[in-house]
Image (cartoon, rainbow, N blue to C red):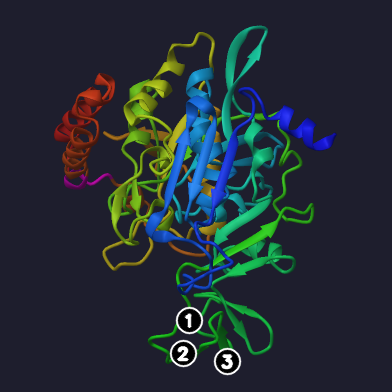
Amino acid sequence: NGRRSALDAIQGDNYVKCLHSVGLPLKDISKPLVQNWPCNPSKILISHIPDRNEIASFGSGYGGNSLLGKKCFALRLGSILGKREGWLAEHMLILGITDPRGNKKYVAAAFPSACGKTNLAMLQPTLPGYKAKTLHPYYLPVGRMRRRRHRLDEIRCRRSFARYQPEAGFFGVAPGTCSHTNPNAMRTIQSNTIFTNVGETGDGGVYWRRAWRRRWTPRCGVTSWRGEMWTPHSRTTRPPIRTRVSAPRPLAVPVHGPRLGESEGVPISARDLRGPPPSGVPLVFEANSLATRRLFIGASMRSEATAAAEHKGKVIMHDPFAMRPFFGYNFADYIDHWLSFEEKPGLKLPKIFHVNWFRKGQDGKFLWPGFGENCRVLDWICRRIDGEDCAVDTPIGRVPKADAVNLDGLQERVDLGELYSVPKDFWLNECKELEAYFGNQLHRDLPPAIGEELRLLGERLQKADN
């Protein structure tokens, strides 16, 4: 019968067995629920057992933990399977970019939580003739080697695990999302959408922090999910920062790529990273062609902590490869696994770029307008992939030449000199902090090539002009 067939199918190594318990009997609840949700946060236990392809979760009410096909399987166990079989499971979005001449490239972007994955995945380019379509919003792409005539010839993203993605659509942080910052997201959530930790306006609408461009624009009252009233003068009751939206993936999604959800995969031409604190990091720079230089950028990423990594917000933490909460095995071995791809003959590796949409000037204001204007940076990246001479060397990598980024039609005035600058003192301090981090976290396990790259970076900075 069907039940027997299902039990037979899960035997062997090709099936990952998952078990989740809220850790709280519903028939006899003797204590108040945590925010009206059955869970047992004092006894949370999440176990990954790679030798048996098993995951067991107890007590958690957080979706990232209880939906075991998401982080636990696709990233943690996935990274272990990738190491065994010679591929990569990464925390990235995939974006297809088509220029006015019809040339298409695929970019994989590794951004830590709350660093702009959703905005980039749903990009609405402002440059005429450019199109952007997402192939996978922000979770679970699996970078895999494609074999062609028994020769590894390119990095492809073969989203094999995407079929196990419980969130069959778009999931994002709502605060700051509005028609000005992400018009495609606002169109997507007009119907059939789940909102979490939001307020309801008197006319039946939905409200979250900075849901409109101005600070407070609802002309009617706003009621929280707890039944509390919010007003512009509220101090103790105001919209929370952990507001989320989850929308399905219908064909009507404005940025829906034609191959979204397929398992065949696409070639990846570039990988974008976004990590360190905004101060002192250029708008964009390209890693040197050396393998260690590329890997060093990923290993040294930092960002503001978020709930996804179980840290308090506004704390700067190291988040190498945007994978710190998701490594399934030793961090040093993970770096070695990345380095191993350089040794595979005939393999065309993607270029590595680092972007920073959030750099601020001395007045505390953002130097770059961001959002749809980020297509201008992607345009420069695509031209660099094609080999155009539009970059200059710096101690940390290659930044755009003064007139290389297309600013035609840009409304805001931008200070390109400051956006591309590489402050010597800032980066020398970064070297010291990275040395302490690697020494504390990896010590003797640090791959010698990465330690040597850190030393060479310090030497290049010392020789550079202020």
Residue displayed at 56% across by 56% down = 119
Q: Nearer the viewer, residue 460 or 236?
A: 236
Q: Magenta region, mostly helix, strand or loop?
A: helix
The quadrant where residue 95 appears: top right
Q: Is residue 294 covered in magenta?
A: no
The type of residue carrying mark 2 is Pro
For the residues labelled 3 and 2, the Cα–Cα distance comes to: 10 Å
Q: Give coordinates of residue 317: x percent, y percent.
A: 30, 50
Q: Residue furthest right?
A: 1
The type of residue carrying mark 3 is Gly
The residue segment tinted magenta is 422-426
Q: Give coordinates of residue 263: x percent, y percent.
A: 71, 32
Q: Which residue is mark 3?
A: 221
For the residues labelled 1 and 3, the Cα–Cα distance comes to: 15 Å
Q: Which residue is mark 1?
A: 215
Q: Nearer the viewer, residue 446 or 464?
A: 446
Q: Which residue is mark 2?
A: 232
